[in-house]
């Protein structure tokens, strides 16, 4: 915008009938219009207490490991997110080496800067998509097992530990705060009372086809490609037990309504 320039006028869509938060956001390449809409929860029926709770352990290799007080467990793999971040860092390093040989402000220097912004935006969208899919699997698992409270551990102390420059780079790219926010937002929605299978090993999304037997990509069309067999037991490193002691293995927890 700026002084002396006309205001930006955008056509109002037909579904936007009430006051909502709207803002224009620069994503590094171009502007985006973000509209925040509040859902109506007045018609929701009160839920009966089930006295069931689940604990969530966030990580990098496994995006989330969930265990209920009944012994049911779910592990969502985070290897796809780590692979995308690793590939993104390698490509950013290659662009940085090319820009170091250019004159600052030259045409090629600016062109490489636009390529870096476009590449970063592309990877951010892919990582955000996988994070939403992974946290959605966690919330759906809690709904299927009628969980009414979710305890999420805060791994901030693990991230602050110095483990060398290579591992520190991986830890600095760990967006566990977004996982906690996504879990909180999704857990505030209605629960669906449904009993499902116990202890599946789940991948949030497919990145590429692999021939390894443990990746879950099967040739049988009757089986979901994102499912792979795992032992029907709760993982050992997940907080599980009674409600009074559910927070003891986690140094910092927060309770989220399912």
Image: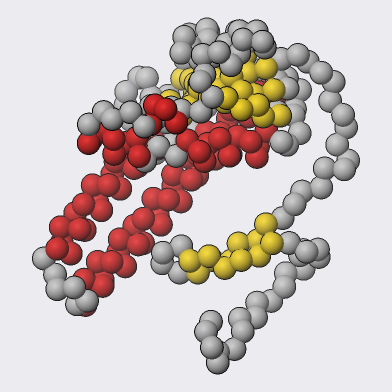
Residue 252 appears left or right of 82: right
Residue 36 appears left or right of 48: left
Whether residue 87 is visible, yes or no, is yes
Q: Residue at x 18, y 64 (%)?
A: 99
Picture layout, residue 227 above or below residue 102: above
User: What residue occupies the far bottom of the structure in this picture?
Assistant: 4
Camera-side residue of 253 and 257? 253
Camera-side residue of 170 and 154? 154
Which x, y percent locates residue 131? Answer: 50, 39
Which x, y percent locates residue 145? Answer: 69, 18
Picture layout, residue 11 above or below residue 151: below
Q: Residue at x 52, y 84 (%)?
A: 2
Residue 139 appears left or right of 2: right
Picture layout, residue 22 above or below residue 163: below
Q: Quadrant of residue 37?
A: bottom right
Image quarter of the C terminus: top right
Which x, y percent locates residue 13? Answer: 72, 69
Which x, y percent locates residue 246? Answer: 61, 13
Whether residue 133 is visible, yes or no, is no
Q: Residue at x 34, y 35 (%)?
A: 171
Picture layout, residue 64 above or below residue 235: below
User: What residue occupies the far left of the structure in this picture?
Assistant: 101
Camera-side residue of 244 and 233? 244
């Amino acid at each position: 915008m700026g002084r002396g320039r006309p205001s930006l006028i955008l056509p109002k869509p037909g579904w936007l009938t009430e006051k909502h938060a709207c803002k224009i956001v620069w994503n590094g390449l171009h502007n985006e219009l973000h509209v925040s809409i509040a859902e109506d929860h007045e018609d929701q029926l009160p839920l009966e207490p089930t006295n069931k709770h689940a604990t969530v352990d966030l990580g990098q290799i496994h995006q989330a490991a969930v265990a209920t007080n009944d012994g049911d467990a779910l592990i969502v793999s985070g290897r796809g997110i780590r692979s995308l971040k690793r590939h993104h860092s390698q490509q950013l390093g290659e662009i940085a080496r090319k820009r170091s040989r250019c004159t600052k402000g030259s045409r090629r220097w600016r062109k490489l800067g636009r390529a870096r912004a476009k590449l970063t935006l592309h990877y951010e969208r892919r990582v955000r998509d996988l994070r939403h899919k992974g946290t959605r699997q966690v919330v759906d698992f809690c709904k299927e097992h009628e969980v009414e409270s979710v305890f999420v551990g805060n791994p901030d102390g693990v991230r602050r530990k110095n483990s060398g420059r290579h591992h520190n780079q991986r830890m600095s790219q760990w967006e566990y705060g977004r996982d906690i926010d996504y879990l909180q937002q999704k857990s505030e929605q209605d629960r669906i009372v449904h009993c499902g299978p116990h202890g599946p090993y789940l991948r949030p999304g497919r990145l590429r086809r692999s021939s390894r037997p443990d990746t879950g990509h099967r040739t049988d069309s009757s089986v979901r490609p994102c499912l792979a067999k795992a032992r029907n037991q709760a993982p050992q490193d997940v907080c599980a037990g009674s409600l009074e002691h559910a927070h003891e293995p986690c140094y910092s927890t927060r309770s989220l309504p399912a």
